[in-house]
Image (spheres, grey):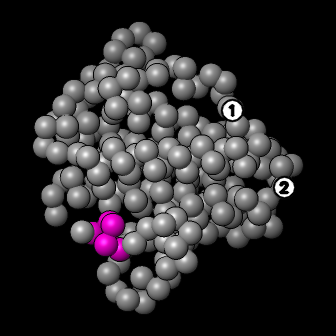
Amino acid sequence: MTPQRYLLAQAYNNAWANHRLLKACGRLSSAELAAPRVSFFPSIIHTLNHILTVDWLYITALEGDCMGAAAFDPEIPFPVFADLEREQRAADRRLIDHCRGLDTETLTGEVRIPRETHVQVETADRVLLHLFQHQIHHRGQVHAMLSGTSVPPPQLDEFFPADSAEQALRKQDFAELGFSEAMIWS
C-alpha cells in the first residue's frame, strides 16, 4: 500500500468514526451534551467542538492557508449539535478530498502552522499522521463520556477489515455517508 492510499484510507476511517460517534451523540439532549463530565474538556459538546476546530486548523494548513489561532475563536463555535454535526461532516469531506489528491510531492511538502511564538514547519505526511492520532484521542474521550449517559457508545475501533461479514457491519453507515469499498480501496 502506498503512503497516499494509506492516508486516504485513514481519512475515510476518520469520517466513518466521526459519523458513528455523531450518530450516537445526536441521540442526546442539549442538556446531556453540555452536562459537566470528567475528561480533558468538560463536556461532550466542548470535546466535539475541539475535534472540529483542530480539523479546521490542520486542514487549512495542509491546503496552504492556515487559519491559525482563529480556528479556536470562539472556543465552542457550535453549541447547537445540528450545526456542529453539519460542519464536522463538511470538514471530514474536505479532508478526504485533500487526501485523494496527495502525491509524493505534496506528502513531503512543507506545511506552515502559525503558533503563538513561532511558525511550526512540518511535512504534510507528519501533519496528517498527527491529525488522525489527535482525532482518535479525543473521539475516545467522547466515547468514554457517552458511557455515563443513556446512549451506549458506538464501536469505533474497526479499520475496514476485508471480510464480507465485517463489510456487512458497515454497510448502513457507508450508505448514509455515500461511501463504498471501491472508493476507499480502488
Find residue 148 and report its image quarter: bottom right
Tag shown at residue 120 = none
Amino acid under disc 2: Ser
User: Seen from this angle, which residue lies furthest top?
Assistant: 117
Please name the residue that numbered disc 1 is placed on: 76
Q: Residue at x 41, y 9 (%)?
A: 117
Q: Main secondary structure of the magenta part?
A: helix
Q: Residues within 10 Å of mark 2 (few under 14, many from 20)?
A: few
Query: In the picture shown, does residue 107 fall above or below 165?
Result: above
Horizontal side, residue 36 vs residue 162: left or right: right
On whether residue 182 falls in the magenta region, the answer is yes
Q: Secondary structure at mark 1?
A: loop
Q: Residue at x 55, y 20 (%)?
A: 70
User: Quadrant location of the C terminus?
Assistant: bottom left
Find residue 160 and report its image quarter: bottom left
Task: Identify the magenta region.
Answer: 181-185
Please name the residue that numbered disc 2 is placed on: 29
Along the line of sight, which residue is nearer the eye, 36 or 167? Answer: 167
Horizontal side, residue 106 vs residue 61: left or right: left
Along the line of sight, which residue is nearer the eye, 142 or 80? Answer: 80
Find residue 5 and report its image quarter: bottom left
Q: Residue at x 70, y 37 (%)?
A: 78
